[in-house]
Image (cartoon, rainbow, N blue to C red):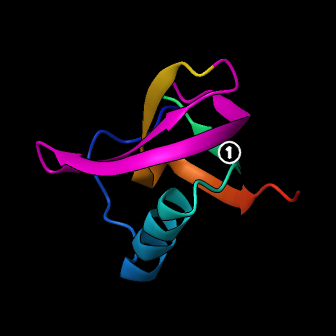
Amino acid sequence: MTMSDEYKPISCDLHSQYELWIIRAQELKLAWQDDQGISRIERIKPVDVRAEAGIEYLYFEDTAEVPRRVRLDHILKANPVKG
């Protein structure tokens, strides 16, 4: 099953939480579904939240410091990495 192309806005509280993690340079364990509907779980460093063409994205670096992005409405779970 693939994710819908229609963007579904996330809550303002969750959006603010992503921004706080970015400000704090907080590493996250992020779970999401990619554009093909494949579930992914990775440790990431969030760097920005941006809107493009009415869709909001979390920009991040993976553990190899490769810049990537994911739609906010495709994120299933995000947890801060301890220590």
Residue at 67 percent of width and 33 percent of height = 39
Per the image, the residue denoted by label 1 is: 31
Q: Pick the residue in front: 43 or 36.
A: 43
Quarter holding the C terminus? bottom right
In the image, farthest residue toward the left? 53
Quarter holding the N terminus? top right
Q: Is residue 67 magenta?
A: no
Residue at 59 percent of width and 22 percent of height = 65
Residue at 45 percent of width and 45 percent of height = 47
Q: Which residues are magenta?
A: 36-64
Q: Residues within 10 Å of mark 1 (few under 14, many from 20)?
A: some
Three-letter code for the amino acid on which mark 1 is drawn: Ala
> In the rendered image of this protein, does residue 10 appear above or below residue 22?
below
Give x and y (percent) for residue 75.
Answer: 54, 50
Give x and y (percent) for residue 11.
Answer: 40, 76
Q: Secondary structure at mark 1?
A: strand
Residue at 26 percent of width and 49 percent of height = 50
Q: Pick the residue in front: 46 or 54.
A: 46
